[in-house]
Structures are given as structure tokens and as C-alpha cells.
Image (cartoon, rainbow, N blue to C red):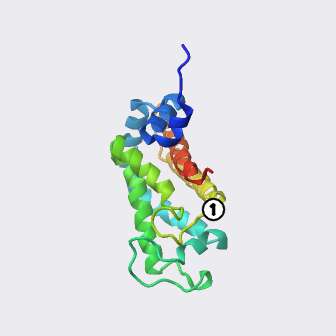
Amino acid sequence: MMQHIDESRLESDLAYRFEYLTGFMEFTAEDIDAIHGAAEYLAPVVPQLVDAIYDKLSQYDATWRHFVPRQHGYEGSVATDVESLDMDDEVIQFRKQHLGRYLTTLVTKPYDEKMVGYLDMVGAMHTPGTGSAKIDVPLVQMNALMGFVSDALLATILGLGLTAELQTRTLRAFNKLLWLQNDLINRHYAG
């Protein structure tokens, strides 16, 4: 039986949008269990994942420049330009902590209304509408970042030595989750 979807509501009702996406992608309780089950394996490697992501971000001025403006919630000193921004700067350590908490949240928290709001906020905070008005990360940079994060996360899962069945379930679950996150980023760039 064909389901009716109120397409205008998809743009105005976050819970409705998430319900539609999870239903369409068949992101189920079993997927959430697989993601939560991966926590014990992924938690110890979160620092290495964060370092790899920031190493990649620092290789391009188009991505690294977004760490020069003052970040929301950060009160310390900031670099004056992209050339003087260093991996050891306080602001980079501050942002690395945020990324580490994000990755930990994905594998430990319930996928409830609060989590949906959190995933949506991750998208919004990279635009001038939320957080710092000076932060406006172009969509192409967000897509590049999500692609890199996805590959790094999937490569990490492939290297965990899980049974074939558990590895497949975990990979599929994270793939769906990252597509959900990507939609909740992209929606803040529409129109």
C-alpha cells in the first residue's frame, strides 16, 4: 500500500522528516543496536579518528579557514589568519573535543527526539543561522567532510576484526546513519 507523505511538512516538521527518512531507509531498532554495540570497539579509537579528520581539514585552506573566526562557546585566543592557525592551538583542541563528543554521542545515546534535534543542530551550527554569525561553511565543504568521515568510520569498522555478520550489520547501520546526518546537514542549505 502506498504511503502518503506531506512533502511540505517534511520541510517544517523535523520529527516527521526523520520518521520519513528512517522509514524509507529502513533504519531500524536493529540498526541502532548495531551502532550502540559498536561503542565498545569505536570508543578507544575516537581520538585517532578525530586526529585523522583534523589532519585532513588542515590540508585545505577552504576547510581550515573556518577555524579562524571565533567559535560559539569558545572564549580563548584565536589565530588572526589561516596561515597562523596551528593544530596545537586551543581553538583546534576545543573543536576536536566537540567532534569526539559527537562521535561518542552517535554510539551511546538513544535515538529519540533529543538525538534528532542534536543531529539537526550539527547541520545548523555550520551555517550563520546558528552559533556564530561568522561561521558559514559552504555545503561543498560539509559534503567533503561527511564523505571523509564516512570513509574513515567505515574503514575503522572494517579493521575491527568483527565477525562477517556483525561487520555487515554495523557497516549498513552506520551507512544509513551517516545518510540521515547528511540530510540533516543539507536541509540547512536549501533555498
Q: How many labels, in total?
A: 1
- Residue in view at x 55 percent, y 53 percent: 188
Q: Secondary structure at mark 1?
A: loop
Residue 76 or 99: which is nearer the viewer?
76
Mark 1 residue type: Pro
Classify 15 as above or below 50: above
Indicate the position of residue 175 as horizontal and vertical percent values: 54, 41
Q: Quadrant of the N terminus?
A: top right
Residue extending furthest toward the top: 1
- Residue in view at x 48 percent, y 43 percent: 161
- Residue in view at x 52 percent, y 37 percent: 10
Residue 92 visible in the snapshot: yes
Indicate the position of residue 15 as horizontal and vertical percent values: 42, 38
Classify 125 as above or below 74: above
Label 1 sits on residue? 138
Residue 11 or 183: which is nearer the viewer?
11
Indicate the position of residue 30 as horizontal and vertical percent values: 40, 30
Indicate the position of residue 177 as horizontal and vertical percent values: 49, 42
